[in-house]
Image: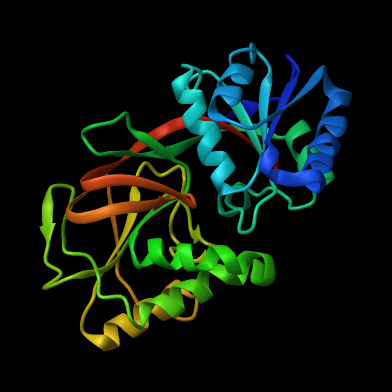
Amino acid sequence: MSDGATTGRGGWLVVGSTSAGSSGRELIETVAGRLAGDGPTEVAVTSSPEDLDDALGHLGDRTLVAVGGDGSAHVVVNALERVGLLSSATVGFVPLGTANDFATHLGMSAEPREAADQLRHGHRRAVDLMAVSDGGHAAELVVNAVHAGLGVLGAERATPLKPFLGRLAYPVGVAATGAVYRGLRSRVRIDGQAVDVDGPLLALAVANAPRLGGVELVPGADITDGALDVIVVPARPWVARLRAVRHAAGRDTDAVTVTRARTVELDGDVGELNADGEAIDVGGSCRIEIRPGALRVLCPTP
């Protein structure tokens, strides 16, 4: 859903993380310099959640610009929720990560100056978020995707490969893990209905957008349709396992069945989930639900 054209009429607040390094800082300053032609622009490079919360507390009527990858988008959205600004803030995302799945789906350029210009002339759009709750903590908001099982271990294996393989790190990590991983002992319910996986669960992926780890895993997913796109893969038989691994590596787009839903529940041996590239501990159970139109973003004008 689009609710009209907008620019930083109240100014811009550009946020980034110290983890971006010196080259990342230069790109953050480049983005800020480009935006400054449209209004007062401030840069906040933060090193902790507390720093980010403090910076957002002074957002006012400015447009927020988050420079980073999917993990940075995840952190910023959850910070907006903590400080009570999620429903009122407008956010632009400038890619500075490895896969940049979320920003890519929004149509953002990977070139910082071009991305800044897209924001200056962009339009505001309401997009969906996902919320992950485990019963004991506040819900964790997710912009792009949640993995359980193979996707979690594959992402862990991919981390040290990113400096060498870039976007290929995730599919390589998944492929290397998939042949030996035995799966989770977990029950799955989609919209309240139990899913029969007949044994361990190899992988669960819940998508808000098409790309996961740089791979077009769920081509039909849409961040404005008010629905989750769910992939459930049993650990056996081995032919199905091989096809699922090929799918996760982007080699077989028809290997798995995608189910559209509003809620997904996991119960059993869950442990960690991978949410937008960030590891979150949910213990033995969790619930994933869609929050339609919960975030206002700036997108390129067609």
**Residue in the image at 74% along x and 17% along y:** 9
Query: Is 47 placed above or below 284 here?
Result: above
Residue at left offset 23%, top offset 44% = 286
Q: Position of residue 89 (x, y in %)?
A: 57, 21
Question: Residue 38: x percent and y percent?
Answer: 84, 23
Q: Is residue 253 visible?
A: no
Q: Is residue 198 left or right of residue 284?
A: left
Tell me which residue sits at (18%, 70%) in the image.
200
| Rendered image coloring scheme | rainbow
**At which x and y percent is residue 296?**
54, 29
82 and 227: which is toward the camera: 82
Q: Residue at x 28, y 31 (%)?
A: 137
Place of residue 184 in the rendered image (x, y in percent of width and height, measured from the top left): 22, 65
Front one among 295 and 176: 176
Relative to residue 292, is residue 13 depicted above or below?
A: above
* Quadrant, the C terminus: top right
